[in-house]
Image (cartoon, coloured by chain):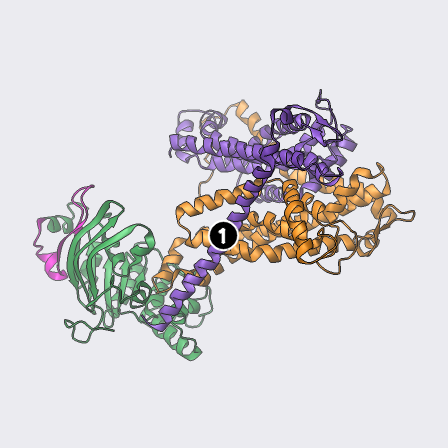
Amino acid sequence: MLTPPSSRRRLGRPVSSRAADGVVKRIISLSGVLAIVILAAIGIFLGLNAVRALHDVGFWTMATGTEWYPTIAEPRFGFVPLLAGSAAVTLTALLLSVPVSIAAALFISEFANRRVKDVAKSIIEFMAAVPSVVYGLVGIAIVVPWVKETFELDSGLSALSGAIVLAFMIAPTIVSISEDALHAVPDELRQGSLALGNTRWQTSYKVVLPSASSGILAAVMLGMGRAIGETMAVLMLTGNAARIPGSLFDSVRTITGTIAAEMGSVVQGGLHQSVLFALGLVLFSITFAINLVADLVLEKQRKRWRR
Amino acid sequence: MVTGPANNGAKGSFDLKEVSVTYGSETAVAGVSMHIPPCAVTALIGPSGCGKSTLLRCLNRMNDELGNATVGGTILLDGVDIYGKELDPVELRTKVGQVFQKPNPFPMSIYDNVAYGPRTQGIRRRAELDEVVERSLKRSALWGEVKKDLKKHAFELSGGQQQRLCIARALATQPEVVLMDEPASSLDPISTQQIEDTIAELKEHVTIVIVTHNMQQAARISDQTAFMLRESMEAPAELIEVGETRVMFTNPRDKRTEAYITGRFG
Amino acid sequence: MNRRIRQARIAQTVAVAVTGTAAALVVAAALFLLVYITVRGLPAISWEFLTDVPRQQMKAGGIFPVIMGTLALTLATAALSLPVGVAAGIYLSEYAPRSRFTRVIRLSISNMAGVPSIVYGLFGLALFVILMGIGKSILAGALTLACLTLPVIITATEEALRQIPTDLRQASLALGATRWRTIYKVVLPAAAPGIVTGSILGLSRAAGETAPILFTAAVYYKRQLPDSVFADVMALPYHIFILATQVTGRPDDIIWGTAFVLVGGVTAISVAAAAWRSAQRRKVRW
C-alpha cells in the first residue's frame, strides 16, 4: 500500500491550545510509533525463540546443512533444501509473471481508455483480495492435474505447479505498482515525445518506461517478497519433499511450507520448535531486506517527480 | 513532399480555412481563417482561455492525443492538408515541432535529449548525431553553457536552460515550423530575454507560431499577430483580427483589439 | 507515408496487441477465478449448509461454526486494529513533523505490509500464545491479525485525511477551535468514507488469512460455538485447507461451498464498501 506524494503540508500552530489537545496529541503520537514497535518486536521474539536452535545446532550448521530430517533420532536441521525450494518456486513464478504483468501495466497506463482502465484495475484488485488458500484449492483442482498430464509425471504436486499459481497471485502486486509508477510519469514528457514525431509506443519505451524503471523494479521486488512469503498455496501445491530439487517437476518444500506444516506438531519449547523460529527469522530477514530496498526505491522515485 | 504554389521556395507556411475545434459537444474554437507566412514569427494573442493553445495544437495535431477533440475546416501546410490521408500525424510532427509552456526535458542526458528526435528518424551514426546536437544547441543559444558537459543530466539545468534545451530538441528534427506555447511564462526575465533572442535568430530558417499573453513580448518578437477572443463563456473563440504586428499595435482595425492591447480587459 | 513511419506504425500496432493481450490475460484469470469458484461452490449452498454443524468427519453437514468463527475473529480484529490504526493515520497526516523519524515510521509501515503472514503467525505464537499465556484463542488470533491489518488501516486513514483540503482545517482553526477539535469535528467526518472503506478492505483480507491463525486460533473441528474470546474456533480459510489436504476422499461440494462462502463474503463486503464510498464521494466534492 502506497502513500501518494502530497504537496500539502501540515498546518501551522493552532490558534488556541488547551490541555486536552496536548493529551490527545500524546496518545495519537504513541500509536504512530506502533509500527516501529511491532516490527522490532517481530524480530526480537523470533530471535528469542530461536536462541536455543542457534546455541544447540549453530547458525552455520543450519544455514549450510543440506539435509532436513527434523524428527529422526538424531535430527538434521539443514536449511539448504528449504531455501532451494523457496528459490525454485519464487524465481519460476517471477519468470512467468513479470513479463506479462509489466506488459499489462503498460497497456493499462499508456494505451487503454479510461473505462477499460477502471474496469481492469478493479478486476485486478479483486484478484489480490482472493485468499491464498483459495488459490491453493483452485491450483489443486486445475493446475496440478494439468501439470501431471502435460509433462507425464507421477504426481503434479511440484515446484512448477506452485510457481504457476504463485505467478497469478503476485500479478496484481506487480501490475498495480508498475502502473502507479508509469502513471506518475508527467504527461508533459509524453507530449514532448509525441510532438517530436514519435508514436505512442516509441514514446512508451523510449521515455515513459525508462522514467518509471525504478518504480517497476520496486514492483518486481515487492512481488518477489510476496512470493517468498506466500504460504498456504505453496504448501498445498508443491508436494513438500524436503530435498534439493533437480528440476521444476520435483516436489519441493519451501521455508514457509515447512513452518506451516511442522509447527503444529512440535513439542512446546523443544529444539525443533526453536529451529522453526530460526527459519522464520531467516524468512523475516529476507523479506525485510527486499521490502526495505523496494520502499527506498519507491520513495526516491516519488521525490523525483515532485519538482 | 508537395510544395504549395504560393511560397517561393521557403517551406513552412500554413493556410487555415474555417478551422473549428470541438470537444464532445462543445465548440471551443470556430471559423478561424488565416495565412501563416514562412520564416516569420506569428504571435497568437488574447485573454486566457480564448483558444490560442487549442488552435496551436491543431497545427501539429496534438489535439488528437488529448481525447475527444475534433477539428473541422482545413489546414494546409505548404499546400498539403495535414488532416488528409497522405500525411501521417507522426510524420507531420517531425516537420512541425513544439515547445511547451513548462520545460519538459526527458530524464536523460543533455546529449540524449537533443539526439532523441534524430534517433527516432533512424540516424545512428555518432558523427552525424554529434553534428546535429551541436548545431541545434548553438541555434537555441545553449551550446556555450553546456558544450563541456553534454553527458550531464538534463534535470540539473536551470529552468531557462531546460527550456532552451527543449527548443534545441525541437530543432534537432529539422522542422519547418516550431510551435511555442507560452515558452517563457514559467521563466525569469533574463531567461525570457534569452529565449526571445533565440526566437529572433531562428526565424531566419523556420516558421514560428507563438502563443503568448504578454503583449509586449508579441510586439517585440513577432512579424504577424493574430488576436483571438471568446465573447462569452458559451460562445466559441474566434479570430478577431490578424495582421502585420507593427500595424496592429499602432492602428488596430477592430475596437475589441484596441481595447485588449491598450489593456482595458484581459 | 515514408518507410520509417510505416514501420513505426506497425510497431505501435504490434505493441498495443501484445500488451493488450497481457492485460487481457490477467483480467481473464481474475474473471475465471470468480466464475469457477461460483460454478463449483454455488450448488453446495443451502440453508442446511449454512446453519448446520459439520458431520461424518466433516464430509457432510454444514459449516455454521466455521462461519461464526471467522466472523468472531474478524470482528475482534476490527475492534483491536481500528482505534489504533486510525489514530496512527491521524498522527501521520495531522501531527507528524517532517523529520527523519517520521520517515522511519513510514518505512516501517510499508515494510510491515510486506511481512509474510506466516511470520505474523510465528510472532503471535511466541508473544500472545506462549509468552502472554493467552493460549490458542480468538483473542490471540485477533491480536495477530490486527498486527497484519494495521498497515492497511493506517495507510487508508492517512490517504483519506490527505484528501481533505487544507482550507477546511484552517477555517475551523480560524474560528478558534483547537487542533484536536478541528480533526474530530471537521476532518474525520469528512474523511470517514475513505477510512471505513479502506479498513473494510483490509479486514476482509484478514478474514481470508490462514497462516497467521494456524498456530494462534484455528482448530480442526469444534462443534460448539465459542463462548468467550479465550475459546479457539474453526475458521473458513483453515477449514478449506483441512478439507483439501487432510480429509480423505475430499468432499468436493463442501470444499467449494466453503470457498464460495469465503470469497463471496469477502468480495460482497468489499464491493459494498467501495460502492458506498463512491456514493459518498459523489455527494461531497472538493
Q: Which residues are magenta?
A: B228-255
Horizontal side of C90 relative to A277 (left or right) equals left
Name above or below for residue B142 compared with residue A270.
Answer: below
Q: Amino acid at mark 1?
A: Ala
C184 vs B124, nearest the viewer: B124
Tell me, what hue is chain A? orange
Other-residue count near label 1 (Cα within 10 Å), few / some / many at <14 / 14–19 / ≥20: many
Q: Nearer the viewer, residue A253 or B214?
A: A253
In the rendered image, residue C185, in percent from the top left (x then y), is placed at 46, 24
**Residue B251 is a magenta residue:** yes
Question: Residue C23, image x and y in percent?
Answer: 49, 52
Q: Is residue A112 magenta?
A: no
Does residue B107 appear in the picture of this structure? Answer: no
Disc 1: which residue = C23
The picture quadrant where one finds residue C140 is top right
User: How many marks overall?
Assistant: 1
Looking at the picture, how far across and down is residue B14, in whole percent? Answer: 20, 64
Rendering colour (chain C): purple
Q: Work out which residue is located at the far right of the displayed protein and give it.
A: A73
The outermost residue toward the top is C227
Chain painted green: B
**Residue B24 x, y percent position in the rendering:** 27, 46
